[in-house]
Image: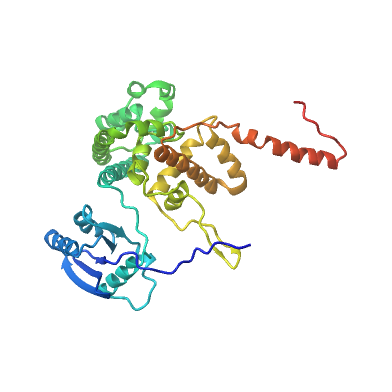
Amino acid sequence: MAQKNYIESVSILHPVCCGIDVHKNKITSTLVYEHKGETYFEVRECSAFTDELTKLRDWLLEYQCPVVAMESTGIYWRPVHNILENHIKVVLVNARHYKNVPGRKTDIGDSQWLAELLRYGLVKGSFIPPAEVRRWRDLTNQRKQFVRSESDFRRRVQKLFETANIKIDSVVSDIFGVSGRNLMETLLAVPSETITLDMVKSCLRGRLIKKADELFRAIKGFFNDHHRFLLRSYLDVIDLFRGKIDTLDLTIQDVMKKEKDLIRRLDDIPGLGPVAIATILSLIGPTLKNFSSSAALCSWAGVCPGNNESAGKRRSGRSPVRKHPLKEILVEVAWAAIKVSGSFYKDKYYRLKARRGAKRAIVGIAHRILKAIYNIVKDGQKYRELGDEYLAKRNEKLKFKRLKKQAKQFGFTLTALA
């Protein structure tokens, strides 16, 4: 069977282009251009200060350079990108995609090799979201850091209670609820040996009132002035972080208010809430114009299998994307989605889990959720819940055919009632 040959001859895609090797304090650039049929390479080195970067931009515009390829360690590419963003197309290259060539171990050599690869269109750029989306990402990242720091200090409080023989967390599931905070304030105000049962009862709310006797036993320990000082310090820091998180929530809601309709449609997906939606949109943007298909988006996020085939043999299908912030939040969303009663994701998860295990199954659900997000964001669709009976009904005819064949083997004839 004849197949189309997709291998084409390599041709020059960008007659004028530039390769930039970026470091913290030094920028090395190689400009490639043609003049009277000859190819010329011009190299410049400059510092990373704004005035030097502005001169670099003016130099590129003088030669009418339409595109640059840039490789950087960490975030040192950002100052260069800030200067070039609205004037020249920037292709941010992953170092592992172009450095597998021996002998190029200098900054000038790296920039020249980048320029040559870009000239023939042989480099693939990383996704750089627009400036507005990058601001969303900064806010959501800051919120995540505050949440992690708050959780760290909450664990310190629990560790402090263990060292002081206070066993509140053995009775109360959340020691930072209303009843738990009331008990902490009592420990801070009154020596633990003088705390009475009535004092404990006055701290409790809801169903915990029935556990007053058990909590009275749990709060008796060796809580001295040293522990009070540490507990007060920890609670002050926790309250500080909680206030910062609440402020960030309001700020994120304000800067993303023009995407209210999109957020409302995404909120229909099981497992997705305001925080998760804001985090996901800050990572992929509100348009997805850089992703040609849902498969491309899932591959970028690392929630689909990778390809590893040689000599007709399929090796490990593990995704090459080991760690990705979008994959992280999608897995969290997937764990929440499979707990929604009557949802398609719950039914699909337990079917996958029986064959592939819990970890692979939850990544499979994350894959499904991301595909739904793609269709909602890119095509403007609304989420449609298939329900937990969808897969069973879809496979109904196939199941009947298989059972009919098995019955025939035992000498029976299986007939459908309706």
Q: Does residue 220 show up?
A: no
Q: In which quarter of the image is residue 117?
A: bottom left
Q: Does residue 271 show up?
A: yes
Q: Where is residue 228 in the image (x, y as percent from the top left)?
A: 26, 37
- Is residue 112 shown above or below 214? below
Q: Where is residue 326 in the image (x, y as percent from the top left)?
A: 39, 47
Q: In which quarter of the image is residue 13?
A: bottom left
- Is residue 292 shown above or below 378? below
Q: At 45% across and 34% down in the image, what residue appears?
A: 269
Q: At 45% across and 49% down in the image, what residue appears?
A: 298
Residue sitting nearer the eye, 16 or 135? 16
Residue sitting nearer the eye, 83 or 348? 83
Left or right: residue 312 compared with residue 189: right
Q: In which quarter of the image is the N terminus?
A: bottom right
Residue farthest toward the right in the current orientation of the protein: 411
Residue sitting nearer the eye, 348 or 175? 348
